[in-house]
Amino acid sequence: MTLTGNMLIGFSEVRGNDGEQSAFNPTTNSEIAEPVFGMGGTLEVERAASLASQAFDDYRRIPLAKRAAFLEAIADNILSLGDELIERAHAETGLPAQRLEGERGRTVGQLRLFAKVVRDGHFLAATIDRAQPSLQPLPRADIRLAKMPLGPVAVFCASNFPLAFSVAGGDTASALAAGAPVIVKAHGAHLGTAELVGRAVQQAVREQGLPEGVFSLLFGAGRRLGEALVAHPAVRAVGFTGSRQGGLALLRIANARPEPIPVNAEMSSINPVFLLPHALANRAETLGSAFADSLTMGAGQFCTNPGLVLAVDGPDLERFVEAAAQALSKKSAQTMLTPGIFEAYCAGTHSVAAVEGVTQVAHGVSAGERPNAAQAALYVTDAQRLLASPELEAEMFGPASVVIRARDVEELMAVAEDLEGQLTATLQIDDGDYADAQRLLPVLERKAGRILANGFPTGVEVCYAMVHGGPFPSTSSPMFTSVGATAIDRFLRPVCYQDLPDALLPDAVKQVNPLHLWRLVDGERVAPEAPGA
Ligand code: NAP
């Protein structure tokens, strides 16, 4: 496919004239000549938002089967892009082809999972409380609840997931599944990849005969376009993955609108890993090398990277550090996504290394002359130092982590209490550790969205029970997940219908149950075929 560098607004191709930008190859540290991308501004936001607004009522009311077929058509069209997509994404991000193929599989799998979620209809939360005219002291009206989409959603692509959290990634898939039109702002780190996937989505909108405003893809630099998008009155919710600073900026814009809107921002997390005493004694070496693998996967550019390891000090922890150091010493430096992310990684590691009482105990293979290549790093300090130095809790986005030596389990508990909100918390536990784990769990439940035992947090399964969310600053909305089937809930709201005639009710709560849903009727879960609902 010939890339044009043009935005896709509904069915139109629009050349942005608010500056130009070339894509960048971080491996060669040079611009990719073709094409040059035209950046959009407020005019393009206006056009995309207006189309999205016009499309909303039609799109949200198409049959669920058709909405599901649309999501599946996007998946098919992405696969049809073949190697061109992988090659372009590799050139723009430096991520290896194998990782990108895996990410494409996840992206397509996510779209198909949401197609299933849509067909199933459970997300509509159909609930019926039948009228009780003879109820004393007052009769009860007929009251029915079904969920509907919030309205057009603005999606900010993530730099670190050019496919799975970008143009047709988790935010877009869940918003489209909810029945919301989507306006995507591409990330400057992978503009060509964005155009390829954008065309796949646009083609699916056409093929399925949907209103053109269901999808638009915008390019914008210098933040003006992103700011205008969040501020636009037609936009009703935001999905974002990136820095804490960026997420908070969007949240401020959304809250300052005459009509504030929800921003689902996934921001920063250091994903503490607790090595409890028996597990450490029994498995220090295995844990050290598995930790090094998790830390360096994808150059550490995962929101679930294990950036903090905590254990009681002693010879077993020394064995762990020694094993991790040995494994890390063999890990090659890896190209990071952008020069900016590489510079932020170097600045982050320098500032941790500069904290008094912090010692660097391991590093990966040097990058030599390779541009933008991150060398892994491991630091050690004690629990009191961490408690006194909040900067040690800042996310170092990349393959670096800090090991915390605690005097005893009491001190581990104190550190756990001190932690900010996290996407994940991990426990390495053997049988003898259950009592300590039971004390830690209530604290970790308050702090994290996902608690793992005997694994490492990188690798987020896309499934029904997944939670990729958590208290601030890991996200701006701890009630939700951005990965997994229930990510759809971020873009829905309940509407209650009181005494509406059956013909005017949405299908989800009509008397005859035309969607064949499981429904909650007078407080009882009722199967589709059950009479009387
Ligand atoms: P970012 O700087 O937060 O940018 C993400 C997106 O939001 C970009 O499209 C950016 O637009 C936009 N944006 C940021 N600030 C904005 C503002 N004030 N107003 C309007 N739009 C704004 O994240 P990034 O570029 O992906 O990476 C930078 C750093 O974020 C990394 O070094 C890393 O520390 C962190 N990060 C964390 C995660 C995670 O999952 N925890 C993931 C990715 C990145 P522009 O490009 O036009 O500025």
Image (tube, rainbow, N blue to C red):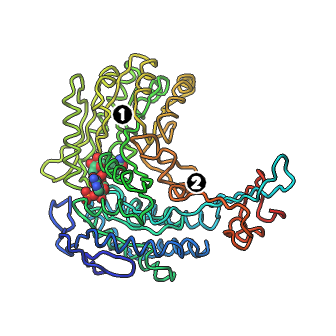
Q: Which mark is residue 464?
A: 2
Q: Residue 357: x, y in percent? A: 23, 22
Q: Residues within 10 Å of mark 1 (few under 14, many from 20)?
A: many
Question: Badge 1 is on which residue?
Answer: 308
Q: Is residue 38 above or below residue 145?
A: below
Tell whether 458 sits left or right of 348: right
Secondary structure of the residue carrying tag 2 is loop
Tell whether 333 sits left or right of 202: left
Nearest the viewer among 429 and 186 is 186
Cβ of disc 2 within 8 Å of ligand 1?
Answer: no
Q: Which residue shows up at 51% across the image and 55% down it?
A: 490
Q: Contact (CB < 8 A) between labels 2 and 1? A: no
Tell whether 400 sits left or right of 103: left
Q: Spatial distance from mark 2 to mark 1, Cα to Cα?
A: 28 Å
Tell whether 22 sits left or right of 59: left
Q: Which residue shows up at 21% across the image and 50% down it?
A: 373
Q: Amino acid at mark 1?
A: Leu
Q: Is residue 523 above or below residue 420?
A: below
Give the residue furthest to the left: 369
Q: Amino acid at mark 2?
A: Tyr
- Quarter of the image for residue 406 reads top left
Tell me which numbered mark, 2 or 1, is placed earlier along the sequence: 1
Q: Residue 363: x, y in percent? A: 24, 37
The N terminus - image quarter: bottom left
Q: Residues within 10 Å of mark 2 (few under 14, many from 20)?
A: few
Q: Which mark is residue 6?
A: none
- Quarter of the image for residue 234 reads bottom left
- Quarter of the image for residue 521 reads bottom right
